[in-house]
Image: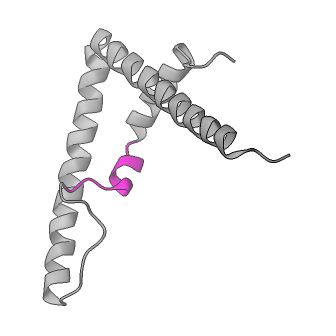
Amino acid sequence: MSLCPSASKRQSVLFLLAGFDTTASTLTTAVFQLARNPDIQERLYEEVVSKLEQFVCYRKLIMYIASIYSVQNHLFTKDGISHEMISDLPFMDQVINEVTRLCPSLPR
């Protein structure tokens, strides 16, 4: 089965909007739940700040080494946040999993 260009375009737009809506719904619910649970919010904040400090120190070290050897560094964005930092937040992962368990954005 092949799709005509207009049907393909409609499917692509639907796919993008569906992904945006579920992400926005999950993030909104997460912010609401964090506001209701200040102890969890504080613990999550501490984890993020701790990882940010750890990765910024690591970034400075990598940039220093790269400058010594005249090598370009593509490990970090301008603000120091990288995919590695985001993926290394276990409590954040637990919070998002709990939010999606309590209030799934799509019915099962």
Which residue is pictured at 54% across the width and 19% down the height?
Answer: 105
Q: Quadrant of residue 12?
A: top right
Q: Quadrant of residue 48?
A: top left
Left or right side of 30 for 5: right
- Please name whichever residue, 68 or 3, is drawn nearer the observer in this view of the structure: 3
Q: In which quarter of the image is residue 25?
A: top left
The image shows residue 40, relative to residue 19, as above or below, that is above
The image shows residue 36, relative to residue 73, as above or below, that is above
Left or right side of 77 for 17: right
Q: How is the image coloured?
A: one colour
Please give the range of residues in magenta: 80-89
Image coordinates of residue 65 in percent, x first then y, are 18, 81
Q: Which residue lies furthest to the right in this view?
A: 1
Q: Residue furthest top?
A: 36
Asked if the magenta segment contains residue 81, the reply would be: yes
Image coordinates of residue 22 in percent, x first then y, are 51, 25
Image coordinates of residue 41 in percent, x first then y, are 27, 22
Q: Could you tell me which quadrant the C terminus lies in?
A: top right
The image shows residue 27, relative to residue 9, as above or below, that is above
Left or right side of 57 for 31: right
Which residue is pictured at 65% across the width and 15% down the height?
Answer: 107
Which residue is pictured at 14% across the width and 83% down the height?
Answer: 67
- Please name whichever residue, 36 or 9, is drawn nearer the observer in this view of the structure: 9
The image shows residue 36, relative to residue 86, as above or below, that is above
Asked if the magenta segment contains residue 101, the reply would be: no
